[in-house]
Amino acid sequence: MQPNEQLEKAFETFDAYNSGDPNEEVFEGKSYPKELLYAQRMTEKLNQFAPGSPEYLQLAARCQHIGRWEIPRASYAMDKKGYLQWRNAEKFHQANIAEQVLISCRYQPEIIEKVKFLLLKKELNTNPDTQLLEDVVCLVFVEYYLEEFAAKHDDEKVIDILRKTMKKMSARALEVAGTLKLSDRMGKLLTEAAR
């Protein structure tokens, strides 16, 4: 199998898995399985932010939330501790699914290990690949999911979440976030969070 064929097969397999998400999101008048749309947005944003990224980064971006719906948030306590436990369980769940898909696509063990390393968010803030993936995650959140989150919370809570998000981003990603097309309210909240 040629390298680009292998990547295409992995993307197709990830997308087929995420097509099973029962949660739907409507975008530009069309309905999509939520995590399928998220995965495609991650690839698009990675290609915009860091074109020509290594294959293992492209793979990690595409399967960032694979199977996310399979561990409901409500299965953990609805507090900060429960949220962190859920996020941790999700990371391992996603790394396990990705590993099985990549084995089925005949990827070399070193590529599989790099993808798992990234999905487990290891060495965030010190590893450039982990930081790059986190930048893309944060940019996708701000561009596509911040508005929905903000609709459910008051401005103070949104500013707090934005500040936490911005702490995880590189200087370059913060610069790019400032250029995203956002509603007036989101633009103001982002400016406030940056103070």
Image (cartoon, rainbow, N blue to C red):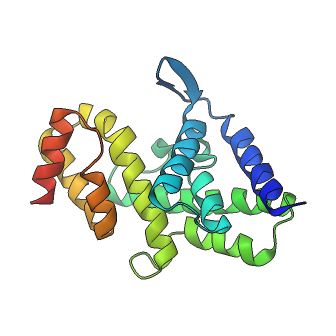
Residue at 77% over, 46% down: 13
Query: Does residue 52 appear in the picture of this structure?
Result: yes
Report which quarter residue 6 is drawn in: bottom right
Residue at 64% over, 69% down: 116
Q: Is residue 14 left or right of residue 77?
A: right
Residue at 57% over, 55% down: 64
Q: Residue furthest right?
A: 1
Q: Residue furthest bottom?
A: 126
- Please tell me whether residue 111 is drawn above or below residue 160 in the rendered image: below
Q: Quadrant of the N terminus?
A: bottom right
Residue at 25% over, 31% down: 151
Percent from the top left, x then y, of residue 148?
33, 33
Query: Does residue 152 appear in the picture of this structure?
Result: no
Count of numbered tags:
0
Percent from the top left, x then y, of residue 38?
53, 42
- Please tell me whether residue 87 is drawn above or below residue 22 in the rendered image: below
- Please tell me whether residue 155 is drawn above or below residue 106 in the rendered image: above
Q: Is residue 97 left or right of residue 181?
A: right
Percent from the top left, x then y, of residue 124?
43, 75
Percent from the top left, x then y, of residue 48?
47, 53
- Foreground of the two, 103 or 4: 4
Q: Residue furthest top?
A: 29
Q: Quadrant of the C terminus?
A: bottom left
